[in-house]
């Protein structure tokens, strides 16, 4: 009985333990039988033929991220740029990743740098700066086509940062500023055209209805007197004639006399005025084509 137990222990130690393998959920083990590829095992627990089958490679099948940089890469218009890029990829066939390429990680990074330099060299600087999404998709398709025979799937490529020379950045800033200034001037000109068109339309309305022009002038004069803070307003004589300011000033004087009399003015008997010497006759002045009239309003 003791001998049987000893034999079983020896079998366990020499046969079962060497053939026992454990593989995590995100791992796959490549099995070689006498040096020849026989398949991929995992995840979980599995047994191998002892001393005949081995698992020298353990492959991580999770999504991996790799950073790489393309320095001093020339665009199609001969502008040097430094591009910082990240690539997302994963192994979908562990057997091909082991048997078709010696180091699939280095191969993926080399392919990514080559694809990045190629896509930048075929694009202008404006395209590189404005169409990152299109360039990312183009690099993803190009890299996936090259890494597919290795059992590697490229999920996406994203350019994180693009650096251009400082002198070129200043020039681009001046160009952008000039473009904004041009747009501002265009908008201002369009506004002036719209305002001029509105005034032209208003002129046609005033031409057909003189009373509207009269009321508008009276309103403008009222606004000036209300906000100006002065009792003297100078207006052209043509406005006096068109708006009948003479009659208005007469009515204003009559209203002032009524206010003075109602506030207890002295009796109507006033001494006779003292005669004054005759004033010299003023020289004849030339005719003024557009004289102005000063209206002095009574204090409020």
Image (spheres, grey):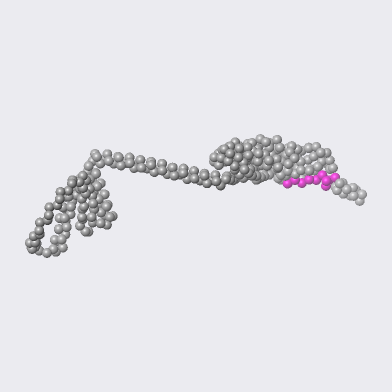
Left or right: residue 182 versus residue 150 is left
Is residue 18 magenta-colored?
Answer: yes
The answer to whether 41 is drawn above or below residue 273 in the figure is above
Left or right: residue 246 versus residue 153 is left
Q: Is residue 94 among what the camera can see?
A: no
Q: Quadrant of residue 140?
A: top right
* Residue that appears at 70% across and 40% down: 107
**In which quadrant of the rendered image does the C terminus lie?**
bottom left
Q: Position of residue 155 (x, y in %)?
A: 64, 40
Left or right: residue 184 versus residue 146 is left
* Residue that appears at 80% across and 39% down: 32
Is residue 9 magenta-colored?
Answer: no
User: Front-most of 27 and 292?
Assistant: 292
Q: Position of residue 78 (x, y in %)?
A: 58, 39
Part of the protein shown in magenta = 15-24
Q: Position of residue 260 (x, y in %)?
A: 15, 61
Total marks shown come to 0
Q: Quadrant of residue 76?
A: top right
Q: Quadrant of residue 226?
A: bottom left
* Residue that appears at 27% across and 41% down: 203
Q: Position of residue 130 (x, y in %)?
A: 54, 41
* Residue that appears at 17% across and 54% down: 252
Q: Is residue 213 among what the camera can see?
A: yes
């Amino acid at each position: 009985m003791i001998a049987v137990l000893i034999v079983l222990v020896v079998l366990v130690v020499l046969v079962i333990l060497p053939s026992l393998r454990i593989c995590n959920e995100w791992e796959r083990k490549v099995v070689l039988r006498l040096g020849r590829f026989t398949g991929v095992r995992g995840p979980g627990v599995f047994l191998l033929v002892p001393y005949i089958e081995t698992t020298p490679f353990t492959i991580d099948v999770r999504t991996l991220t790799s950073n790489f940089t393309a320095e001093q890469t020339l665009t199609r218009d001969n502008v040097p740029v430094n591009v910082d890029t990240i690539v997302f990829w994963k192994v979908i066939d562990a057997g091909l990743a082991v048997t078709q390429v010696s180091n699939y990680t280095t191969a993926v990074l080399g392919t990514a740098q080559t694809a990045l330099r190629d896509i930048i060299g075929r694009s202008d600087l404006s395209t590189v700066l404005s169409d990152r999404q299109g360039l990312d998709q183009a690099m993803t398709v190009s890299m996936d086509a090259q890494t597919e025979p290795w059992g590697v799937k490229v999920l996406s490529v994203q350019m994180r940062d693009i650096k251009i020379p400082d002198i070129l950045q200043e020039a681009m800033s001046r160009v952008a500023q000039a473009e904004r200034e041009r747009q501002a001037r265009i908008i201002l000109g369009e506004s002036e055209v719209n305002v001029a068109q509105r005034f032209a339309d208003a002129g046609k309305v005033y031409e057909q209805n003189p009373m509207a022009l009269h009321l508008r002038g009276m309103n403008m004069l009222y606004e000036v007197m209300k906000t100006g803070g002065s009792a003297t307003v100078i207006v052209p004589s043509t406005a006096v004639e068109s708006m009948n300011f003479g009659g208005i000033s007469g009515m204003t004087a009559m209203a002032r006399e009524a206010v003075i009399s109602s506030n207890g003015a002295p009796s109507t008997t006033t001494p006779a005025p003292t005669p004054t010497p005759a004033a010299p006759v003023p020289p004849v002045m030339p005719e003024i084509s557009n004289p102005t009239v000063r209206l002095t309003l009574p204090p409020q």
